Amino acid sequence: MIKVECFTWDYLDSNMYVLKNGSHLLVIDPIDKEDVLDYCRNADTITVILTHEHFDHICGLNKLRSMVPNKVKVIANKECSERIGNPKLNMSVYADTLMALAEKTVDKVLQPFSCAVADIIFSEGYSFDWLGEDVELISTPGHSPGSASIVMDNMLFSGDTLLVNSFMTRFPGGKTKLFKSKSVPVLQTLLNSVDFVYPGHGTIMTRETAKRALDINC
C-alpha cells in the first residue's frame, strides 16, 4: 500500500494529502501551512490534484506554484479550474465569516484570492499513470460544481463529496438532487473497489464506515 501523509489546515481542519515516491510528490488539495509547504520544497516534480474549488482546499496552491516554479502540474475538472480563479466562487470572499461560524480565530485577515487555471483540465473523468500507479479522477458534483473524487490503489480521496457526518450541499453551488442522481451511484460503485476513504475533513474511513455515511446522506 502506498504511504499517505495527511496535513490539516489549522483554521477549518481541511486535509491535504501527500504521496511520495522518491523525490516526486502527488499532492491532493494543498493547504497554506509553512511546514507543509517546506516539506514539498525539494521535490523534483509535484503533481497536484484538486478535489474541488473551495478556498480551504486550494489556499496553498499559489505559494506552492511560486515556491517550486516549473515543477508543479495541477489537475482539476473544468468547473473547478474555472472557479478557483473567482474569489466569490472559490468562497475566499466569505472566508472570515465561515471561520467565525466555525468558531475559529485567526491572527490575520484572510484576503480573497484567485488561482490560475489547472494545467490539465477534464470533464467527466481522467486517468493517468503516476510513476507506475494508476490514478483515476471522476467528477462527483453536489457539494460544489467542481467536485471530483480520486481513486488510487485501494484508496478513495473524496474531498468534501463524502464526509463521515455529511456531504454538505448547502454551500453556494451545492445541489442535493444532482448529488443523489449523479454522484451517489458513482460513489457506490467506487466504494466496492477500495478499502479506505480519505475525506477532505475528518479522519480516514474504512469502506464500511464510508458506505454508512453515504447511506445516511442518500
Image: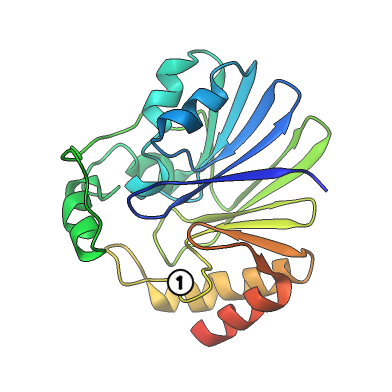
Amino acid residing under circle 1: Phe
Q: Nearer the viewer, residue 184 or 46?
A: 46
Q: Is residue 19 left or right of residue 162?
A: right
Task: Estimate the x, y position of residue 59 in percent, counting from the top left.
Answer: 36, 38
Kindly state the secondary structure of the residue where label 1 is placed. Answer: loop
Label 1 Cα neighbours within 10 Å, binned few <14 / some 14-19 / many ≥20 = many
Q: Is residue 30 left or right of residue 151?
A: left
Task: Estimate the x, y position of residue 105 in percent, counting from the top left.
Answer: 21, 52
Image: 215 above or below 134: below
Residue at image location 46% in from the left, 32% down from the top: 118
Say which residue label 1 marks. Answer: 167
Q: Is residue 167 left or right of residue 23?
A: left
Residue at image location 49% in from the left, 32% down from the top: 36
Quadrant in the picture for residue 173 = bottom left
Q: Nearer the viewer, residue 3 or 79?
A: 3
Task: Estimate the x, y position of residue 97 in percent, counting from the top left.
Answer: 16, 57
